[in-house]
Image (tube, grey):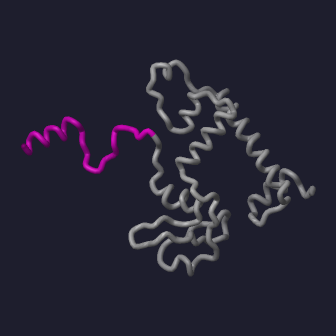
Amino acid sequence: MRELIESAIETLGYVQGGPSRVLAPHWRRGGFGTWIFHPAATGRFQKKGRLQNRQVPVYIGPWPGVPVRGRCAVERSNACWVPISEGMTPHGSRHSYKTMMDELGTPKKLQDHQLGHVDGSVQAGYSHVTATMVQRLMDGLTEMWEAALESRWRMAPGSPVAVLDGLLKERFGNAV
């Protein structure tokens, strides 16, 4: 039996703990969801082991704040993240991006590429992403960004967040 197993291991090229040869349908980002996305969206770390659901302590020096982790994190921090949007998830934000691309008339081939999807249909092989498609998407997203920045400026021409304040001043000056 051992010889059969070792022969199968040799034939298949199996390496214990090695990477899978089959790509996941969506790219994974290690602890991105646990340590960055969920805390940014909710303002709280998820429950993990003995650690309860808790606020995200940060150093406020570099914007938007660097999460402080480890022992006595709360004592070493000088602020906490505030939620971007309660209930926001990485999957849900993908839906928002898909909706934006739909609004911009982005071709399905480019949408699949942007979202990390693989279309296994026969029809999928008859088209490909072009530089023109990408440029149109970038132009549309840039227009959306500029409209959002202008909308934010109308609410208040300045911001205590240095990066946003700089963007507002660069774009609109000190005009009120």
Q: Position of residue 96 (x, y in %)?
A: 62, 44
Residue 31 located left or right of residue 161: left
Residue 16 located left or right of residue 75: left
Q: Quadrant of residue 47?
A: bottom left
Q: Residue furthest left?
A: 1
Specify start and end residues of the magenta stretch as a single range.
Answer: 1-25
Task: Report the front residue among 18 and 117.
Answer: 117
Does 17 lie within the magenta span? Answer: yes
Q: Position of residue 50 (x, y in %)?
A: 40, 73
User: What is the total number of numbered labels drawn onto the structure image?
Assistant: 0
**What's the residue at 48%, 74% (across, down)?**
70
**What's the residue at 61%, 27% (across, down)?**
107
Does 12 lie within the magenta span? Answer: yes
**What's the residue at 85%, 54% (across, down)?**
154
Q: Position of residue 32 (x, y in %)?
A: 50, 55
Q: Quadrant of the C terminus?
A: bottom right
Q: Quadrant of residue 104?
A: top right
* 32 up-or-down from 56: above or below: above
Q: Quadrant of the N terminus?
A: top left
Q: Quadrant of residue 147?
A: top right
**What's the residue at 58%, 62% (across, down)?**
42
Residue 135 located left or right of residue 76: right
Q: Residue furthest front?
A: 87
Q: Position of residue 142 (x, y in %)?
A: 73, 41
Q: Residue furthest right?
A: 175
